[in-house]
Amino acid sequence: MAEAYRLAHGARRRHWYLEPNLFLEELTDLDLDDRARRALREALKAYRRGLYLACASMLGVVFEAAWYRAANSLRPTGSLADAVQQERTARMQELVASRLRGVDGIPATLPQELLAHAALLRELRNYGVHPAGPVRDDLERYLEEEACGLLILQTHHYLTRLVGAVEAATPTQEP
């Protein structure tokens, strides 16, 4: 029943998660670059304008940028360094998640949750920028106001969790 109701366009209130500076407030440790912050601003602007496909696609860009920042914070070596250098995003995310597993202070399920959200955003981004192929109802449902708004909130949640996990897993520098 909730899907049948929508706020009138002019009745929308400003929510904190639609303000880029507030959205990024807890994410300063990720040190997102200018392009990633621009992608976030554009994602939130697209949402406010009812452009949910653009919003979801740009959220995928932001989340991917955050994963690369996380990988670099973990001082990548070996196969993780190779995945970062070769821009093999899915592989890099798997390797970062692997580094997060078993670290004190990181819930056991968090790496898999982060991977699941990353996979969803990657699917949405690819679905948005590669229009060939059949309509996918499993992804189309995220391209409506309520579901896309929830996607924004979930992305913020997982970005803050990623920040905390990377902090817990980052090797400390010797004095």
Image (tube, grey):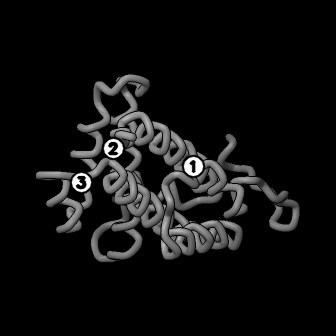
Q: Give the mark nearest the N terminus, 3 or 2.
A: 3
- The mark lying in front, picked from 3 and 1, is 3
> Which quarter of the rendered picture does the C terminus lie within?
top left
Q: Position of residue 160 (x, y in %)?
A: 54, 44
Q: Nearer the viewer, mark 3 or mark 2?
A: 3
Question: What crowding class fits label 2: few (fewer than 14 Cα within 10 Å), some (14-19), or many (20 or more)?
Answer: some
Considering the numbered disc 3 on the image, is that residue within a helix, a strand or a loop? helix
Q: Secondary structure at mark 2?
A: helix
Q: Is residue 148 left or right of residue 62?
A: right
Residue that numbered label 2 is attached to: 115
Amino acid type of disc 3?
Answer: Met
The residue wearing badge 3 is: 92
Q: Give the residue drawn at x 75%, y 55%.
A: 6
Q: Quadrant of residue 95?
A: top left
Residue farthest right in this picture: 11
Residue type indicated by callout 1: His
Q: Residue at x 48, y 44 (%)?
A: 163
Residue 33 point in image, percent of width and height: 49, 70
Classify residue 8 by image quadrant.
bottom right
Left or right: residue 130 versus residue 87 is right
